[in-house]
Amino acid sequence: MSPRSKQQNEVIRQKSIEAIREAALELFARNGYHSTSISQIAAGAGVSKGLLYNYFESKEALLRDIIMEVVALGDTFMSRIRAATDDGAEQIRMLVEASFSAVQQNRHYWKLMAALSLQTDALSGLMPMLKEKQEENLRAIAEMFRKTGAARAREMAYYFSAVLDGVLMHYMQLGGNYPIEEMKSLVLERFLPEC
Amino acid sequence: MSPRSKQQNEVIRQKSIEAIREAALELFARNGYHSTSISQIAAGAGVSKGLLYNYFESKEALLRDIIMEVVALGDTFMSRIRAATDDGAEQIRMLVEASFSAVQQNRHYWKLMAALSLQTDALSGLMPMLKEKQEENLRAIAEMFRKTGAARAREMAYYFSAVLDGVLMHYMQLGGNYPIEEMKSLVLERFLPEC
Amino acid sequence: MSPRSKQQNEVIRQKSIEAIREAALELFARNGYHSTSISQIAAGAGVSKGLLYNYFESKEALLRDIIMEVVALGDTFMSRIRAATDDGAEQIRMLVEASFSAVQQNRHYWKLMAALSLQTDALSGLMPMLKEKQEENLRAIAEMFRKTGAARAREMAYYFSAVLDGVLMHYMQLGGNYPIEEMKSLVLERFLPEC
Amino acid sequence: MSPRSKQQNEVIRQKSIEAIREAALELFARNGYHSTSISQIAAGAGVSKGLLYNYFESKEALLRDIIMEVVALGDTFMSRIRAATDDGAEQIRMLVEASFSAVQQNRHYWKLMAALSLQTDALSGLMPMLKEKQEENLRAIAEMFRKTGAARAREMAYYFSAVLDGVLMHYMQLGGNYPIEEMKSLVLERFLPEC
DNA sequence: CATGAATGAGGCTTCATTCAT
DNA sequence: AATGAATGAAGCCTCATTCAT
């Protein structure tokens, strides 16, 4: 019955928050945002509905929180790549590798993101920020192509990121039988012919 | 005095059905299936909620109906292309043209389809059929590549359809500012270099 | 196209009305009043919903109409019996015979009546009349017993009609396997021992 | 501060559940199953509609729950009687007493059961179980008659239970002015003449 | 006489959210 | 920090009834 220390409390808090986030992500990705209820998330996280509302203002806020995490993850990727090398082709290669491996390791995140990116609802408040991020990434990718000496770097960036998203989307749709490795090879081949 | 003739009734019915379909498509595409209420659809179509249920068994049946229409549209495309020419490269060119123009002319349909294809819910019953269709299209596209003499025709088909979907998805996400024409050129260039 | 004569119209009217009544009775009895829709009745009768409302003010009015018919039928029975003989025992015997044969020949009517008699709803307006009828029948039956010289004729009337209703209710509940003939014998035996 | 204990919660739950059950029983019996709305039940129980669905899966499940309670009550009666004595006549006497007193003390239950037993709808799933129960009771009653040395014990059981149901049904229909005590005497007299 | 398209009130049910403990 | 009983708005759907033809 001795009162918990501040640190102990903080640990407990973080554990609960993380459990909620994970359960929510899993369920949102598997069943869709609207088809997932707060009750399911709380049950999945092993906490009460009340506690969930201690940490997250609302269902939408919980979704926002998860999305911000994914966005941050993406930013980290890009930073690392730029830090690793200054060679455009190599950066593109790393980006392809990183994208495929991220999606393969964690289909949940990306399926959720893809599904949400096509829905205007449930994300209303976040849309501008997400578009901004996409724009930012596009600029970064264009810069990579520019470094390879490619003509029409910006168009290539648009095209490249569309290809990447297209392949990964199909992978998420079709799952296990998708020839994901072959597709990765094809992408690399066709964007980095010299390698 | 006398009741309306069968034909008169059929005209009236079709008018209402079409209004409902259109309103539903528009709203489903814009706001998402779950975020669209039957009331909104009825209001959008200018009919009562009750009438909607005279023609569609349920909200899900309405969605199904719309999806079946899109699927039929896609089938028509493929048939026409195959009927038009036997030259693989020409077929691919026509497919690109048809896809881009379809999406540009009717963004609603395709945005809805894309969004739904990533949702596990709200489509449970239709998923098998849709996957079968996709498989069928893939085979048809592979056959086109085979005719061009391309190596690894099946892989190319996977890749090609991913590219197409990726580009069109981005177009649907970004809307007006997307360089859609440039992307079309790039797609054609990169898959039909000889033209 | 020659206009129908008044008589022809009347024939048509009566045919439609009768078809509606029959369909309604059948459906009310089989599926219950609340579980039967006007659409079902109209379909069952082979007429349109609109025509149904030409002849019956409302669903409840249709029910009332049917009930009145049953009541009238009951009155006819009693009158016939009293006209046929003045002997109490014989009257009772006839009543038993008539009741059993009516129920056996037309379970629909009686099942509906029994079900409704226990529901306060859907009959609100008719209840007083029905109670009055029951009271009237009770008096008539008591008079029959009185003629047989039985003591406590009124109590016997209550008891007798309860027995009759109980047996017939069980028959309607259990249907085919109910030993209806044996029960009739038992009723006769126990109320008319001297026969 | 701390959450309620399991026991406290259980008490609270049972209170609400019981309030809902009672309100539902009262309203179902008075107005009929179909004419009673969930809103009415919730209002009658002094809880929200939502809470009702915390405890009962559906309106039909609520009805089932109530029916199961009545069935259990009936089973208890029969068991007690058989445990109390082995004398057939005494058992029958007890059964009559118990039935009359049960119905007088709790008209709601029995009116609801009687009404439902004549409805094909709203009970579909339960019908087989109820028929089985009735069959079981019939066998038990036949056994009682057999012990009294009566001939045709099974027929007597059918007849006896029809009489009981008939009398009690009339009581429920006519209410206060029904000569219930006289009827009880008559039943006992006529089935247990030797007493 | 006859039709059936159309309406809208009202019923059942779900679920995000609150709050007493 | 934690619980879960309780709420009520909102969604889907049914169906008695109306009315233009």
Image (spheres, coloured by chain):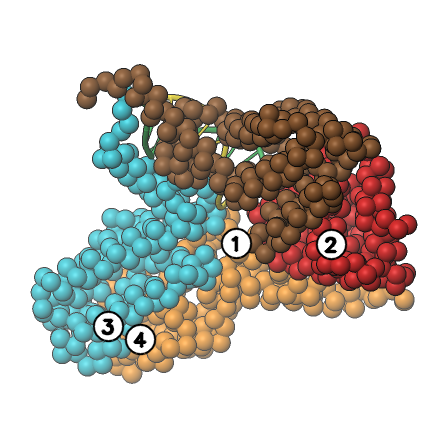
Chain colours: A brown, B red, C orange, D cyan, E yellow, F green
The three-letter amino acid code for the residue at tag 1 is: His
Q: Which sits earlier in the primary sequence, circle 4 or circle 1?
A: 1
Judging from the image, mark 1 belongs to the subunit labelled C
The three-letter amino acid code for the residue at tag 4 is: Val
The three-letter amino acid code for the residue at tag 3 is: Arg
Q: Determine the CA span between mark 4 and mark 1.
A: 34 Å
**Is residue C182 something that shows in the picture?**
yes
- Count of numbered circles on the image: 4
Give SS at disc 1: loop
Quarter holding the C terminus of chain A?
top right
User: Which label was assigned to residue D139?
Assistant: 3
Q: Which residue is mark 1?
A: C34
Q: Are marks 3 and 4 in contact (CB under 8 Å)?
A: no
In this rendering, do the residues under marks 4 and 1 share a single chain? yes
B121 or D106: nearer the eye? Answer: B121
Looking at the picture, how far across and down is residue C82, in whole percent?
Answer: 44, 72
Mark 2, Cα crowd under 10 Å, few <14 / some 14-19 / many 20+, is many
